């Protein structure tokens, strides 16, 4: 049966409505907003119950089907999801581990780069390939990374004919594991640039490249950061998967999510809007606690970023929060645009009281500093024998202090493998977490990267001369 095509609208209300394929390639909307479905697909309890027992790739195809209706990938989605998750190192793809009564971990670190971003990007890389092939066009992906996004994007696009990818990282400022996961990939379409500067310098260069309309058009620039709707969509899958494993849709569940850009937890909200019974989302923050402060007060105010043991959550501005805001102000794009303009100018804004009240029915925030993070990693190891990474520890703690009804199964998303952050894990437990077999030779592999000055025109000419247009 063919589903009716789904259209997407911008959260700022002034960009054209698009179908899935255009949303995938566009990333950001032309009015600066983010794309969301014009209407949320609605599923009954029965629709969810029918998915129980399916394997992960089959379930993924079923959950994503309504969102890609009308796309060139709609016809053979299950083939795509099978290929996307074939290389994952756990046969369950996203296994659940039980820490205590109604206290679970959803392990999202069995992909090629050991962080949850693989679960979306491995599928999204194949979607790019299929859509570009159908259109006979190609793209140049440019992105900046401080850690996990760069390697996950490179693994997802390496060797693809229609894609060239350039990832900028700050020279000497990423961890050795993170850098080597990017620089040891040997493929003609992969280009690592080490910028003599900070992560913010890299980010500024990328923003400037996208702002240069002539260059953007000439190179067909595209982005794979978490504002891309396709990534959110592919993340909805493991919320449905995990909830079914602990008794949904017959009973309600709760998720605790270590959060930075709000992309991961927003995917859970999508599952809830489709009809999955989720009683609460617990948003875990490290010392960069803008979201926790927001849920407490209703005011979104930036402070400087401090480095922590959970670097993938060292973020000032959670871009995907705009999607939730849009929903909770009655999908009033003009109002979202006004609030976001104010935020850009003053570094702060207040969410209308009714919208904040609606959000706090479903969302709550809790924070944990580095000392607490080490304490929780140690405690979980002593009481359960499980090694967890610092991001996951923030989530476990947030879930435990949220004061939920103990009868509701609570699942923390384990967003990274402990071996990705070995120093913190060893300090907390005395155990050095070994890299999985697929990566044991990471430190023997040959690295490839080009060092460039913190200079826009240098990066621009490098991209221009190395993309295979
Ligand atoms: C990216 C990342 C996060 C934050 O996810 P968001 O979608 O940005 O909220 C948390 N943990 C790890 C390990 C990550 O790589």
Image: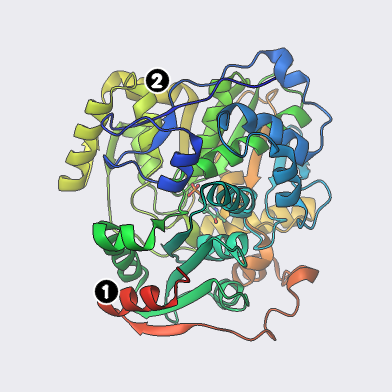
How crowded pointer 1 is (Cα within 10 Å; few <14, some 14-19, many 20+) is rated as some
Give the foreground label among 1 and 2. 1
In space, the residues marked 1 and 2 are separated at their CA atoms by 43 Å
Q: Position of residue 404 (x, y in %)?
A: 59, 27
* Mark with earlier residue (1, 2): 2
Which of 65 and 310 lies nearest the eye of the viewer?
A: 65
Examine the rendered structure and indicate whether residue 53 appears above or below residue 384: above
Q: Residue at x 39, y 58 (%)?
A: 220
Q: Residue at x 42, y 63 (%)?
A: 143
Q: Residue at x 82, y 32 (%)?
A: 54
Q: Residue at x 68, y 24 (%)?
A: 408
Is residue 70 shown left or right of residue 46?
A: left
Determine the secondary structure under disc 1: helix
Q: Quadrant of the C terminus?
A: bottom left
Determine the secondary structure under disc 2: helix
Q: Is residue 403 visible?
A: no
Q: Describe the colour scheme in one phrase.
A: rainbow
Which of 233 and 75 lies nearest the eye of the viewer?
A: 75
Q: Quadrant of the N terminus?
A: top right
Which of 101 and 416 lies nearest the eye of the viewer?
A: 416
Q: Position of residue 293 (x, y in %)?
A: 35, 40
Is residue 245 shown left or right of residue 32?
A: right
Examine the rendered structure and indicate whether residue 32 appears above or below residue 161: above
Q: Position of residue 222 (x, y in %)?
A: 42, 55
Rendering quarter of residue 33: top left
Examine the rendered structure and indicate whether residue 87 appears above or below residue 66: below
Q: Disc 1 marks which residue?
A: 456
**Circle count:** 2
Tag shown at residue 358: 2
Tell whether label 2 touches label 1 (CB within 8 Å). Answer: no
Q: Is residue 18 visible?
A: yes
């Amino acid at each position: 049966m063919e589903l009716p095509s789904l259209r997407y609208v911008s959260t700022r209300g002034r960009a054209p409505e698009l179908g899935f394929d255009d949303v995938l390639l566009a990333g950001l909307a032309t009015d600066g907003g983010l794309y969301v479905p014009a209407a949320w697909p609605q599923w009954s309890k029965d629709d969810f119950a029918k998915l129980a027992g399916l394997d992960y790739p089959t379930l993924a195809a079923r959950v994503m089907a309504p969102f890609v209706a009308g796309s060139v990938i709609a016809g053979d989605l299950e083939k795509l999801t099978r290929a996307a998750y074939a290389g994952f190192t756990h046969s369950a793809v996203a296994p659940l581990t039980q820490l205590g009564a109604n206290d679970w971990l959803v392990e999202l670190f069995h992909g090629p780069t050991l962080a949850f971003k693989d679960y979306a990007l491995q599928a999204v890389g194949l979607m790019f390939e299929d859509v570009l092939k159908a259109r006979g066009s190609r793209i140049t992906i440019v992105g900046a990374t401080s850690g996990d996004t760069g390697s996950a994007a490179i693994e997802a696009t390496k060797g693809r004919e229609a894609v060239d990818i350039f990832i900028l990282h700050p020279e000497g400022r990423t961890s050795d594991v993170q850098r080597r996961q990017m620089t040891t990939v040997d493929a003609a379409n992969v280009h690592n640039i080490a910028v003599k500067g900070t992560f913010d310098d890299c980010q500024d260069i990328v923003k400037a490249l996208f702002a240069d309309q002539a260059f953007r058009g000439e190179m067909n620039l595209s982005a794979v950061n978490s504002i891309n709707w396709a990534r959110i969509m592919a993340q909805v899958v493991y919320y449905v998967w995990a909830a079914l494993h602990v008794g949904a849709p017959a009973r309600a569940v709760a998720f605790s999510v270590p959060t930075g850009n709000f992309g991961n937890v927003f995917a859970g909200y999508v599952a809830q809007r489709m009809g999955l019974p989720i009683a609460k989302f617990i948003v875990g923050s490290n010392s960069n606690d803008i979201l926790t402060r927001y849920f407490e007060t209703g005011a979104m105010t930036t402070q400087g970023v401090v480095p922590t043991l959970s670097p993938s959550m060292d973020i000032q501005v959670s871009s995907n929060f705009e999607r939730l805001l849009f929903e909770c102000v009655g999908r009033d794009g003009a109002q979202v645009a006004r609030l976001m303009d104010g935020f850009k100018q003053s570094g702060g804004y207040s969410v209308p009281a009714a919208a904040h009240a609606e959000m706090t029915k479903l969302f709550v925030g809790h924070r944990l500093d580095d000392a607490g993070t080490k304490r929780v990693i140690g405690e979980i190891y002593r009481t359960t024998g499980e090694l967890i990474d610092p991001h996951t520890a923030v989530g476990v703690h947030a879930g435990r202090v949220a004061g939920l009804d103990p009868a509701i199964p609570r699942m923390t998303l384990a967003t990274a493998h402990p071996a990705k952050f070995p120093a913190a894990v060893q300090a907390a437990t005395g155990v050095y977490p070994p890299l999985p077999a697929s990566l044991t030779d990471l430190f023997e592999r040959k690295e490839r990267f080009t060092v460039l000055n913190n200079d826009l025109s240098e990066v621009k000419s490098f991209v221009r001369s190395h993309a295979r247009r």
